[in-house]
Image (spheres, rainbow, N blue to C red):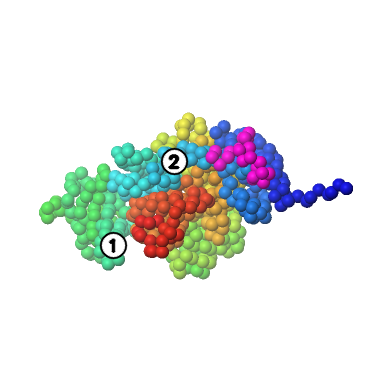
Amino acid sequence: MEQDASPPSDIELLRERVLRLARRLDEDAAKRRSSIEAALPQHRASALNLAHYLSLRCQDVRKLQLELAAHGLSSLGRCEGHVRNTLDWLQVWLSGAHPTSAGTKRDYPDAADAERLLHTNARALFGPRPRDRHVYIMVTAPEVAAASDEWADSLLRAGANVLRINAAHDSPREWRQVIETFRGRAHSLGVPVRVVVDLPGPKLRTEIRQRQPGVVHLRRRKDALGRTVDPAVVPLVASARAENQLPIPPPWLSALQVGDTLRLTDPTGRTLGLAVSACGSGLVGTSSHSVYATSGAKLIWERDGAVQAEGAVGTIPDRPRRVSLGVGDRFLISESGQPGDAGQVALALAEPRLIAAVKSGERVILDDGRIVAVAEGSGPDGLRCRVTSLVKPAVRLQSGKGIAFPDSELVLDALGPADETALAVALELADAVGVSFVNTATDVARVGERIRAAGKKGFGMILKLETRGALRDLPAILFEALKYEPVGLMIARGDLAVDVGFERLAEMQEELLWFGEACHLPVVWATQVLESVAHSGLPTRAEVTDAAMSMRAECVMLNKGPYIATANRLLADIIRKMEMHQYKKRALYRPLSLAGTPTPLSRGSL
């Protein structure tokens, strides 16, 4: 009598489920064939892997993952760069076949291909790999007055690899000065560097139209005991074009010498001395006291104790006043920025069609989330808003800060006149351009085709992912990105947090890291990395943890500040140490002193 066939084993059932999953991925990838074939030849395997990853992440495979892990197999948790090949290997191991038979003929990448493609794309965008780490460090340029040879040398010696110019501020003339200083010092020190110019993009910014008299106020830096660590420094100019420049009588500039003294009478009637020093191609005044100066203040020029001339501080431009806001305070947003009622806080936004699109009850977020308000209605005078929460009991808002309407459906123009100017400067002076506020694949194509038309081979694009629109259209954006080379992604966490909500930021930055790995494009981890160090020289505990997490990207961006070289050195040190323990999502088991000795750790043991 013939016996019934024995039921399939757990291993056989598991293999069948993996096989069905692989077939599903192949079917879904076939539907994206046109997008895959549109990629550059060198990116085609990446485009195919991206299609496989998208298919995988559209399904709930959590139960399968747990069962695979229970059998000591890959749980698919680290397969982003080689999805389909991982399934091939699982089928081989589950079938008991010889392991060399997996993926002998394929178009999709295996683990070695994925790593090679990612590193190749990172080097194409950021330059030669740093000698002592895989992760690059990008640093934001300061104002031109602070961009001295000493600043550049300190950054380069601390390990900076890429300079970022934020074209939302300053002018092409100043960008050029900063870039030339940085490149010149890098050449002298024999350090390879790249320069990226961030387009301003369609970020909305408010203006405060009410003005107040201009005052030069520069603070000295002090230690915990109140002792001066670094003096106050002020550039000496004939005519002030920016804040914190001291305009002196023009004839003095050509005759001043290093070592001379300028005696300044401040608004309180106190007289303090400014020692004249050289800084780059200009002169600065330094003081061990904080500096306050107003237009017309008395000024005396001395050399070796002898008075050379008497004069006055030139015109210091007036500036927008700062406004204080507390919870419950109301303010008005309008095109003119004129208050409807006496004493009312008013903000100008030169986008009347956007103001009209905001509905009652929708959130209004100012200054990168420091102020959260709600729209209460609109009228002929503008959009009326009420503050609902603040990062501290009262916040002073400056002109030019960003504003976001995360609940509103707004359509923003992609490339404005300021972007066109910045793109032209970038193509002339830089190695790549940061495309701000990418929302659709069209935004990528618009800039990508301009770069291609310029014929500048090797000029890169970094797509800044910072909006809900970018997250909604991410697959199309990534397939479009693979039509260009070199290209990378930036997780711009500041604006992204404002747009999607701070509670979702951790989730979103994690997913964007995965997608970068899936299409083998380098990722920049940006916004507020070691921010306290850059401004005070000391880190917070949370910042150190954040910096340790950042090394899962290919590049980490620092902002600017008086202690930026200190922040750079600390970040490089954290990255070097963490790379011994982790690569991307993969834990690496180097020998631990904790596991082998009961004695306290020595200073250099980890």
Tell me, yes or no, whether the highlighted magenta stretch contains residue 105: yes
Q: What amino acid is labelled 1 in the image?
A: Lys
The residue labelled by disc 1 is 222
Residue located at (30% from left, 58% from top): 218
Q: Which kind of residue does numbered mark 2 sit on?
A: Phe
Q: Which mark is residue 374?
A: none
Residue 541 drawn in magenta: no
The one nearer the camera, 117 or 139, is: 117
Q: How far separated are the C-alphas under marks 1 and 2?
A: 37 Å
Q: Which residues are magenta?
A: 90-113
In the depicted structure, whether residue 158 falls above or below residue 545: above
Whole-percent x, y for residue 142 in the image: 36, 49
Which one is nearer the viewer's eye here, 88 or 502? Answer: 88
Q: Quadrant of the C terminus?
A: bottom left
- For the point 47% across and 68% down, the residue is 326
Q: Quadrant of residue 55?
A: top right
Mark closer to the chain start, 1 or 2: 2
Residue found at x 51% / y 66%: 389
605 versus 325 height, above or below: above
Pick the residue in front: 307 or 175.
175
Tell me whether circle 1 and circle 2 mark residues in contact (CB < 8 Å): no
For the residue labelled by badge 1, is the local secondary structure a helix, a strand or a loop? Answer: strand
Q: Which residue is mark 2?
A: 126
- On the question of residue 175 being in view, the answer is yes
Measuring from the top left, give residue 419's x and y in whole percent: 47, 42
Q: Secondary structure at mark 2?
A: helix
Residue furthest to the right: 1
State whether residue 423 is above or below residue 492: above
Q: Can the viewer see residue 297 in this picture?
A: no
Dividing the picture into quarters, in which one does residue 244 lie? bottom left
Q: Nearer the viewer, mark 1 or mark 2?
A: 2
